[in-house]
Image: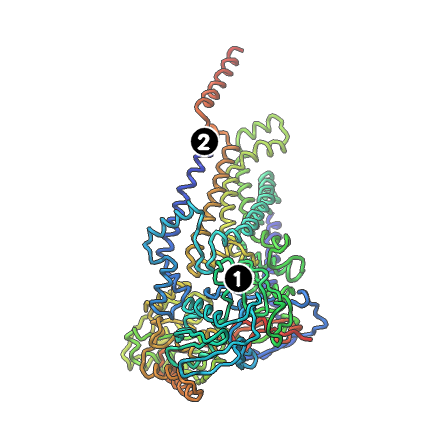
Amino acid sequence: MAKYILKRVLMVIPVLLGVVLLVFTICEFTPGDPVYSIVGTNVSEEVYEAKKAELGLDKPFLVRYVNYVVGIVTEFDFGVSYGTGRNVGTELLERLPKTFKLGLCSILLSVIIGIPLGVLAATKHNSLRDRTIAAGSLVFASIPDFWNGIILMLFFALYLGWLPATGTDSWKGYILPVISLGLPPVASLTRMTRSSMLETVRQDYIRTARAKGIPEGTVIKRHALRNSLIPVMTTVGALMGSTVAGSVVVETLFGIPGIGTLLRNAITTRDYPLMQGGVLMLAVWISLVNLLVDVLYAVVDPRIRAVYSSGKTRKKKEAQPQGKVEEHGEN
Amino acid sequence: MKKLRKILALILAMLMTLLISACGTNGNEEPSQVADPTPGVSQGVVEADPDAFERQTAADSLTVGVMWELGSFDMAQNNNWCARVMVYEGLFYIDQTTSEMHNLLCDTYDFVDDTHLHIKLRDDAYFSDGSPVTSEDALWSWQRMVGTSENNTVSFINFEEFEIINDKEFILAMNAPYAAVINVLAGPTFYITSKNMENYTADDYWDKPIGSGPFLVTENVSGSHVSFELNPNYWNSELMPEFSTCTIKLYGDASSMMIDYETGALDGVTNIDGTDVTRVLNGDVKNTSYMLDPQRDVYYIALPEYMEVFDDIRVREALACAIDYDAVAAAALGVMGSKATGPLGDGVMYQKTYDGVRYDPDYARDLLAQAGVTDLELTVYYEATSIYTTMITMVQAYWDEIGVTLNMESGDMSTIREYLINCATDICIYNNGGNYCLDPNQNLSFNAANSMNGCIRLTDEELNEYLSTGASSYDSAVREEAYGKAQDWMVASYRQLYLANSYQMNVYRPYIEKFVGGTYRTTYFRFVDFAD
């Protein structure tokens, strides 16, 4: 198991280096000069060149890339924002907690609602309950988060006055954005859990369990649900990445100063250090989530554990059934 | 089962209808007061009853919403203007209501000659840290700001040297006579900041600015808000603000900002969305006052000098006559704009108004035939804002009627800027936003022969002579004549097809007597007055 986790952790390093190289390269070839974004178009050649040198953009691409990577590895330095002159790390750390809080709460909401709904639908296949849940999830999966965000804002903030429309000064401020961001994942998880459960409950071992007289609740909880969770976990992992990285619209709508709005502004102003730092942070997050999902796979699925078990353990395990067979044989 | 499906479908349809109807205004409701939507400086009140309206925000405070991402208080950065004007001050300021110029940190000034301006600072002006405002501070501020951002570069392009005479007096030397100098010095691009910030880091600039203004920064939360409290030792009792705390909340979405305003979380907001403007004018936003005033922007299409086909004025005139300007302005801006009346926007000094080009596609076709131009195909690279997109899409349709094909390629401003500078677009759509100064020099200098923007650059000697005379003469009559001739030339040449003037609407609660707006572009929240 430790070997499996170590291998997964080591795989994150080339992924992140690749992300940095990719973002750097994209920035290099993206049209739009950050110097003009700062000094405008009505400047002399001297002012332009001076600003370019000040930003270090007069150096060759590879030199800048190596300097950037060395800066991160040795000093955890992501550079300085062109827009504010502040350290990118500081800017990101100010904004990341809000985005993570929003993203994680949305995923939590979708797990709490989505998985039980999927199970409920699957256990009564083709019933009214199943169809209602399926139709509802289809509707919510189709509604974009900004639209349901505006509707929620109009009802609960403007008409009813129960919740604040924007801001995150209190926990109340998170309710509407979390629901807005969480509704599409609820629908996705419901649909995924439902289809996975339907596939599982048709398996022979479920039929066997039922034939043995095990109560239906136990069959569902202990045998069907656990085996259905592997594809659901994959979906949750993917959603954790995409929800955090894709929260820019909801952040903008609800006035949440998160990393999404920061990245949007960095892109429009060609603030390369901020763009690179932000994308790298998101890449780290997505890599960590994937790592977690991979580890959970191993916890849930004994087949994966078996692959990474040490030779000694594997031999021991392989020996055990043979012994049992012999014992049975003797009997 | 079929019946059940029908019922479910019906319920869903009803839900959707309810939700969609919640997004729009109630069209059946009689407007309580329909204001005159005539663009221009117009003000109005919708069911303003201060006694009936309960204020939600704290007393003795001002909470406003803006659609910007504010940043640092470092004057070397080109952002944060509406927050900076709370803590920094300049030598002069322009009254937003009357457009009159007043001294602020400047006690007296006089021109030594055409290129040297002698300024004496006030003896009683102090920074928030208690230190007096001196010539050294002015020099340090000037050095820090000059050439560091677009607005500063435009403003300081004529400034050459800064000579200190004593603690309170200095001379600004210019490389040529610069008539707009006082106007420029009144803008936020030349604010005097304390030299005690000399060793500041970027983080220090973020929330510890030292200025001579009436407010101190208490909190600057990136992407969220900036909070201020009154500087208890503010030196100028005559300009003491009417509130002791202020919060500028930042929004990325205009509709969210408006909802916050309507729930009472904000005392006022600037530059509201076109849809909300209509709602305000229809009386759908209760207990609100509004001001619709010019942004001093003129949207126009430039026919660049580097395109040979445009050398023939008949082609330029044909393209001009093929456009219905009223329709373009109405479609792109609605009540937030009107057909342009010339190269300068409303509110800019020495503005001349023209009747505009007659919409006559037949005449346009004749002109093209006379010029021997057939199957003209052009490509425009434009910034993908809704206004530009609407305008250029309509122009494409109008030009199509006279046999001119316009291919459209969009991008963000950073991308499009490169096409403009590198002369890589056949035409361009632009607006000559008036920066922070009422002087036409600020607007028209973008078109001058030395402009880096090749697409809008006009090298004609006659025009540049007018621009140069206007920029350098201290005689108002001479300037008026020169800028008048420059505008005549620009209109007659059809090098630029002026589409629309734009306006903005600010809304505020009835307990506010005077909000920001009027003729000046920068939002001076410090001058907001509350009703007694």
Res. B6 visible in picture: no
Query: Which residue sits at x=55%, y=66%?
Result: B66
The quarter in which the C terminus of chain A is drawn is: top right
Work out how far the residue at label 1 is from the one at label 2, CA to CA, in angstroms.
46 Å
The relative height of residue A33 versus residue A247 in the rendered view (above or below) is below
Which residue is label 1 attached to?
B252
At which x and y percent is residue A99? 54, 51
Where, by quadrant of the figure, is residue B14 drawn?
Answer: bottom right
* Residue nearer the viewer, B179 or B357: B179
At which x and y percent is residue A295? 50, 35
The relative height of residue A181 versus residue A118 in the rendered view (above or below) is below
- Point out which mark residue A3 bears: 2
Q: Residues within 10 Å of mark 2 (few under 14, many from 20)?
A: few
Asked if both marks, 1 and 2, belong to the same chain, the answer given is no
- Point out which mark residue A97 bears: none
Judged from this view, the residue extending furthest toward the bottom is B477
Q: Amino acid at mark 1?
A: Gly
Query: Which residue sits at x=36%, y=48%?
Result: A66
Judged from this view, the residue extending furthest toward the front is B166
Left or right, B262 with respect to B355, comes to: right
Q: Chain of mark 2?
A: A
At which x and y percent is residue B322? 38, 78
Element under label 1? Answer: loop
For marks 1 and 2, give the one nearer the viewer. Answer: 2
Q: Chain of mark 1?
A: B
Res. B305 visible in picture: yes
Q: Residues within 10 Å of mark 1 (few under 14, many from 20)?
A: many
Where, by quadrant of the figure, is residue B300 drawn?
Answer: bottom left
Left or right, B355 with respect to A223, comes to: left
Element under label 2? Answer: helix
